[in-house]
Image (cartoon, helix red, strand yellow):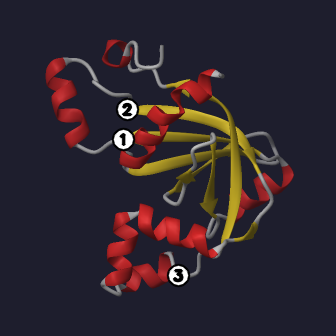
Amino acid sequence: MSKLEKHWPQIMKLANRAFPKYAFATINADGSPHVTPMGSLILKDNCTGFYFEGFSEQMRENLNRDNRISVLISDFRLVSWIIPLLSGRFSNPNAVRLNGTVGKRREATQSEMDAFKKDKWAVNLARILRWRGYRILWEPLSYVRDIKFHAFESVNLGKMSHGHWE
């Protein structure tokens, strides 16, 4: 079992509670980094996942040329920081980087669309309440890309995060 497979359940828990969600890093044609905020990543049990590709044209161009990706998952909710700041230690990992490769853009299946709506409570609430922002941000999402993760890196927060991934 690889280190990634061993820690995958813990990574999935972090991804489910992470807010404001994720940052995806790709490589521009000139070799410079390009970072895109993303909220639609869904992780699966087998060190893979998928995300809905919608608005980031630069990220799409980058991945069509070079399919490597790095995903930062971090939980910046205030409630996740209060006790650790008082105690001097996070009881659970608060951030991780996942490295992988992305597949070709394809149409989303109905089960993937349902998983996104189910997994993302804010999306589901906005859909149920028929908020205008839901129609603008999430109704047009119909294309996904699969991600196969190959490795992860812990985010070093000094003694606050010591021992989480050992």
Q: Earlier in the sequence, mark 3 or mark 2?
A: 2
Amino acid under disc 1: Asp
Where residue 93 sits in the image (x, y, percent)?
38, 28
User: In the displayed structure, would residue 162 be above or below residue 69?
Assistant: above
The number of discs equals 3
Drawn side of residue 114 relative to residue 128, left or right:
right
Q: Secondary structure at mark 3?
A: loop
Q: Earlier in the sequence, mark 3 or mark 1?
A: 1
Q: Residue at x 25, y 38 (%)?
A: 80
Amino acid under disc 2: Asn
Quarter of the image where the N terminus is located: top right
> What numbered label is drawn on residue 139?
3
Q: Residue at x 41, y 48 (%)?
A: 16
Instruction: Give the Cα distance between marks 3 and 1.
Output: 26 Å
- Provide the residue designation for mark 1: 75
Q: Secondary structure at mark 2?
A: loop
Contact (Cβ within 8 Å) of mark 3 with mark 2? no
Where residue 142 sits in the image (x, y, percent)?
64, 76
Instruction: Give the Cα distance between marks 3 and 2.
Output: 31 Å
Instruction: Give the Cα distance between marks 1 and 2.
Output: 6 Å
Drawn side of residue 87 relative to residue 95, left or right:
left
Q: Residue at x 69, y 49 (%)?
A: 147
Contact (Cβ within 8 Å) of mark 1 with mark 2? yes
User: In the displayed structure, would residue 151 be above or below residue 57?
Assistant: above
Where residue 71 sits in the image (x, y, percent)?
58, 42
- Provide the residue designation for mark 2: 94
Residue nearer the viewer, 34 or 152: 152
Amino acid under disc 3: Glu
Q: Secondary structure at mark 1?
A: strand
Where residue 99 sits in the image (x, y, percent)?
66, 35
